[in-house]
C-alpha cells in the first residue's frame, strides 16, 4: 500500500453460487484512496458498489485479492481496522427506543470509548448535525433529514480516519442534501477521508476528488470527474425535445457531425462545437432545446448505458 493510501484494494474478486448459477459480483477490481480525499464509487444498481464496501470492511470474505485498510490486512485484521472507520449505511438503523443523545452514547460504547469521553464529544457532534435542539428527542420525532444527519454524526463518534458512505443523501429533499454536502465538505477540510457511493451525479461531481465507475463488477473508468468527462465525452451537449425532436434528429442532427443518442422523445447531441446545431434548431418548428456543458451524468450514461437496471 502506498504510504499516502488509507485504503488499498488490489485485484479483488468475489463470486456467489456455483456451476450454472455462479455469478461474478466483483471482477478484478483495484483502487486506492489517498488520505484526505473523497473517492466515489459510481455504478448502476447491481454493479457491485455495496459488495465492494462490505469486502473493504471485512463483512464479506473475498475469493481472491488484497485489501489493506488503515494499515491492517482485511479480513484478517478487520476488527482493529474498523475501530478507525465510520460507516453511514444506505438506510437509517437508529435505535427507536433511545433518544438522539442515547443513540450516540450507546454507539460509542461499541468502540470501547469511555462514557465520559463520548459525552464530551456529543455536543460538537450535535452541533455538526444541527441537532442540538433535538438532543432529548426520540427517533420517531425526527424528520428524514434529521435522521440522516444523526446517522452521519453517529459515524463520527469514534473520530474515524476514513468514513464509508453508502448513498448518504438518498430520499432527502434538496435543502437536506445541501446541508449534508456542506457537512461532508467540512469533514474533508478537517482531513478526513471519505469513500462515497451515490446515484446522484451532481453529488459526485461536487464532492469527489476522484472516482471509479463500476459496471458488472469491473472498474470501467477512473479519475477526477473533470478528467473523465474530458476523456470520454464531447465538450457540449444539446438536448432536443418536443413533437418534432426525433424528426429533427434524423434530418438535421446527424448532418452536423454530432454524436446522437435517443432516449424516449429526447435527442441528446454531443459535440465540441454546438453552433451549427443551434443554428439549425432556431429555424426548425416543433422543437425545444437546451444547450449545456457535458457533465458526469453524460459520462455515466455513455459508460454504463441508458437501459434500466433492477
Image (tube, rainbow, N blue to C red):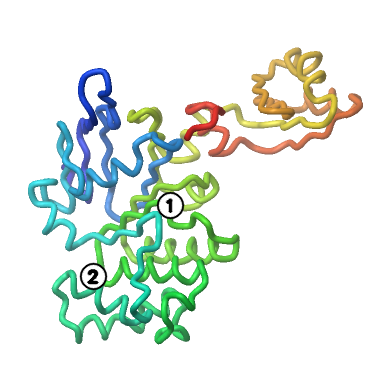
Q: Dot 1, crowdedness within 10 Å: few (<14), some or many (≥20)?
A: some
Residue visible at 17% across and 69% down in the picture: 111
Separation of residues labelled 1 and 2 (CA atoms)? 21 Å
Q: Dot 2, crowdedness within 10 Å: few (<14), some or many (≥20)?
A: many
Whole-percent x, y for residue 130 in the image: 47, 77
Residue visible at 48% across and 27% down in the picture: 303
Residue 32, relative to residue 178: is it above or below?
Answer: above
Is residue 225 found left or right of 119 in the rendered image? right
Residue located beneath label 2 in the image: 158
Residue 54, relative to residue 11: is it above or below?
Answer: below
Depth order, front residue of 85/216: 216
> In the orientation shown, which residue stands out farthest toward the left?
76
Residue located beneath label 1 in the image: 167
Depth order, front residue of 103/6: 103
Counting residues from the start of the chain, the first of labels 1 and 2 encountered is: 2
Whole-percent x, y for residue 95 in the image: 33, 72
Residue visible at 26% across and 18% down in the picture: 20
Whole-percent x, y for residue 81 in the image: 15, 56
Q: Nearer the viewer, mark 1 or mark 2?
A: 1
Amino acid at each position: 500500500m502506498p504510504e499516502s493510501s488509507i485504503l488499498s484494494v488490489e485485484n479483488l474478486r468475489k463470486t456467489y453460487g456455483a456451476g450454472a448459477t455462479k455469478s461474478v459480483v466483483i471482477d478484478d477490481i483495484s483502487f486506492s484512496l489517498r488520505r484526505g480525499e473523497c473517492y466515489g464509487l459510481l455504478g448502476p444498481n447491481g454493479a457491485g458498489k455495496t459488495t465492494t464496501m462490505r469486502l473493504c470492511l471485512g463483512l464479506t470474505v473475498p475469493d481472491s485479492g488484497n485489501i489493506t485498510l488503515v494499515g491492517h490486512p482485511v479480513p484478517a485484521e478487520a476488527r482493529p481496522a474498523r475501530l478507525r472507520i465510520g460507516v453511514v449505511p444506505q438506510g437509517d438503523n437508529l435505535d427507536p427506543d433511545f433518544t438522539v443523545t442515547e443513540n450516540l452514547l450507546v454507539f460509542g460504547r461499541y468502540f470501547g470509548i469511555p462514557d465520559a469521553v463520548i459525552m464530551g464529544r456529543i455536543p460538537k457532534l450535535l452541533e455538526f448535525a444541527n441537532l442540538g435542539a433535538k438532543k432529548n428527542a426520540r427517533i420517531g420525532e425526527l424528520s428524514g433529514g434529521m435522521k440522516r444527519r444523526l446517522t452521519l454524526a453517529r459515524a463520527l463518534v469514534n473520530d474515524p480516519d476514513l468514513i464509508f458512505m453508502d448513498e448518504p443523501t438518498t430520499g432527502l429533499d434538496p435543502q437536506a442534501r445541501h446541508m449534508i454536502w456542506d457537512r461532508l465538505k467540512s469533514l474533508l477540510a478537517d482531513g478526513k477521508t471519505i469513500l462515497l457511493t451515490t446515484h446522484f451525479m451532481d453529488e459526485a461531481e461536487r464532492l469527489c476528488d476522484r472516482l471509479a465507475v463500476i459496471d458488472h463488477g469491473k472498474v470501467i473508468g477512473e479519475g477526477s470527474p473533470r478528467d473523465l468527462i474530458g476523456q470520454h465525452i464531447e465538450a457540449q451537449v444539446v438536448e432536443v425535445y418536443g413533437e418534432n425532436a426525433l424528426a429533427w434528429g434524423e434530418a438535421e442532427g446527424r448532418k452536423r457531425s454530432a454524436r446522437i443518442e435517443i432516449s424516449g422523445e429526447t435527442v441528446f447531441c454531443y459535440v465540441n462545437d454546438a453552433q451549427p446545431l443551434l443554428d439549425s434548431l432556431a429555424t426548425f418548428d416543433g422543437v425545444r432545446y437546451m444547450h449545456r456543458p457535458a457533465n458526469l451524468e453524460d459520462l455515466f450514461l455513455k459508460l454504463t448505458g441508458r437501459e434500466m437496471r433492477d
